[in-house]
Image (cartoon, grey):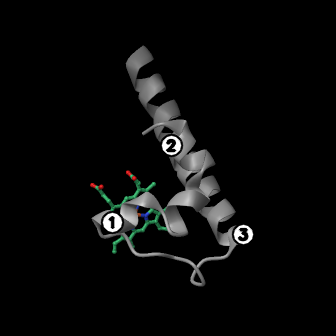
Amino acid sequence: MHAAYIENLDKFVFRGPAMARGMPDFTGKLSADDVEKIKAFIQGTADSIRSKATTEASQ
Ligand code: HEM
């Protein structure tokens, strides 16, 4: 997944292009602060998986 998806996550969860493909609109359900927390969660998970994969690859 391209990093721009995470940078622009608010544009996907609030009336995003995926609505046409069945994704619900989170307007009024999630706050801007919630989206920042989701970004941090995704980034943190990706970082932890990536460092583990790098460690395994170097062994
Ligand atoms: C906070 C929660 C969520 C986030 C951050 C999120 C994020 C995204 C993103 C970034 C995309 C890609 C947009 C694109 O390719 O144009 C996407 C696509 C999609 N999402 Fe979500 N999503 C969330 C929750 C959900 C939920 C709860 C559902 C369904 C109940 C859902 C259904 C879909 C569908 C059907 C697509 C289109 C997939 C496709 O084109 O193949 N999403 N979502």
Q: Indicate the secondary structure of the residue bearing disc 3.
A: helix
- Numbered badge on residue 20: 1
Question: What amino acid type is highlighted by mark number 2?
Answer: Ala
**Extreme-right residue of the structure:** 33
Q: Indicate the secondary structure of the residue bearing disc 2.
A: helix
Q: Residue 4: x percent and y percent?
A: 56, 40
Q: Quadrant of residue 23?
A: bottom left
Please tell me which residue lies in front, 11 or 52.
11
Report the residue marked by disc 3: 33
Question: What amino acid type is highlighted by mark number 1?
Answer: Ala
View quadrant of ligand 1 = bottom left
**Alpha carbon separation for disc pair 2 and 3:** 20 Å
| Mark sitting earlier along the chain (2/3) | 3
Q: Is residue 59 visible?
A: no
Left or right of 9, for residue 59: left
Quadrant assignment for the N terminus: top left
| Mark sitting earlier along the chain (2/1) | 1
Disc 1 versus disc 3: nearer the observer: 1
**Extreme-top residue of the structure:** 58
Image vertical order of residue 45 relative to residue 21, above or below: above
- Numbered badge on residue 46: 2
Disc 2 versus disc 3: nearer the observer: 3
**Alpha carbon separation for disc pair 2 and 1:** 27 Å
Question: What amino acid type is highlighted by mark number 3?
Answer: Asp
**Alpha carbon separation for disc pair 1 and 3:** 25 Å
- Graded by Cα atoms within 10 Å as few (under 14), some (14 to 19) or many (20 or more), the crowding at tag 1 reads few
Please tell me which residue lies in front, 3 or 19.
19
Left or right of 21, for residue 55: right
Q: Which residue is found at the position 42% from the left and 59% from the top?
A: 17
